[in-house]
């Protein structure tokens, strides 16, 4: 099954489920859905940063400071956060990601709006990122990540989540 055929929950402005449709249809119709964003840090506090593959449905080949993705039909944000983190990092046995914040993101016509649940998790395991999702990766110190914000083209939803986290942490 392709990513476009995956069933996902459609939700309203209050994040209540109103139906289920294939992801491709949800994107094409600009419907509201759910996503989980997980900031991954290693034992030294560095943040996992990656470049998305050119085959991604949304924001191909852009950089991201979160792993994650669309919450599946009937799946909770917490379940999706753990599943997505383990899949994209190519690990198993991660601790349960810790929820930090949630906001409604408007893609400006790219793929509708999505409720974005932001998490963090520590990964002390060696990573082997999913080749279908990740074209390049590294764990970067926060200072280097901040320096790259103006140099690299970032996924706008991840950048919005990162800015909200920084504001929340007073940086």
Image: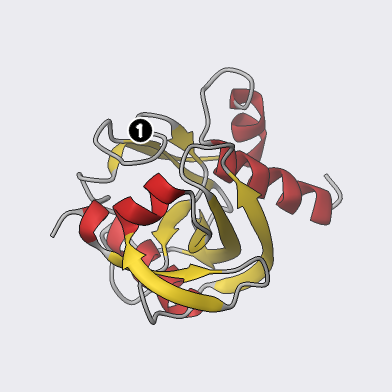
| Residue depicted at 65% across the width and 25% down the height | 147
- Considering only vertical position in the picture, is 31 above or below 75? above
- Considering only vertical position in the picture, is 31 above or below 163? below
Q: Residue furthest left?
A: 1
Q: What's the coloring here?
A: secondary structure
Q: Nearer the viewer, residue 17 or 91?
A: 17
The residue that disc 1 covers is 60
Q: In the figure, is residue 34 to the left or right of 82?
A: right
How busy is the neighbourhood of tag 1: few (under 14 within 10 Å), some, or many (20 plus)? Answer: some
Q: In the figure, is residue 37 to the left or right of 54?
A: right
Q: Position of residue 21 (x, y in %)?
A: 33, 66
Quadrant containing the C terminus is top right
- Residue 51, picture quadrant: top left
| Residue depicted at 26% across the width and 59% down the height | 90
Q: Position of residue 161 (x, y in %)?
A: 65, 49
| Residue depicted at 38% across the width and 45% down the height | 28
Evaluate whether residue 169 shows in this view: no
| Residue depicted at 55% across the width and 57% down the height | 114
């Amino acid at each position: 099954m392709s990513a476009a055929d995956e069933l996902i929950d459609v939700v309203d402005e209050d994040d209540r489920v109103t139906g289920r449709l294939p992801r491709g249809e949800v994107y094409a119709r600009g419907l509201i859905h759910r996503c989980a964003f997980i900031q991954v840090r290693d034992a030294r506090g560095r943040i996992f940063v990656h470049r998305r593959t050119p085959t991604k449905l949304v924001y191909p080949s852009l950089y991201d400071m979160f792993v994650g993705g669309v919450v599946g039909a009937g799946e909770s944000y917490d379940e999706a956060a753990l599943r997505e983190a383990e899949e994209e990092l190519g690990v198993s046995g991660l601790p349960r990601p810790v929820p930090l914040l949630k906001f409604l993101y408007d893609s400006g016509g790219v793929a509708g709006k999505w409720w974005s649940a932001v998490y963090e998790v520590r990964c002390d395991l060696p990573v082997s990122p999913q080749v279908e999702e990740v074209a390049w990766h590294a764990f970067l110190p926060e200072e280097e990540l901040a320096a790259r914000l103006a140099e690299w083209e970032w996924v706008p939803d991840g950048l919005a989540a990162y800015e909200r986290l920084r504001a929340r942490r007073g940086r």
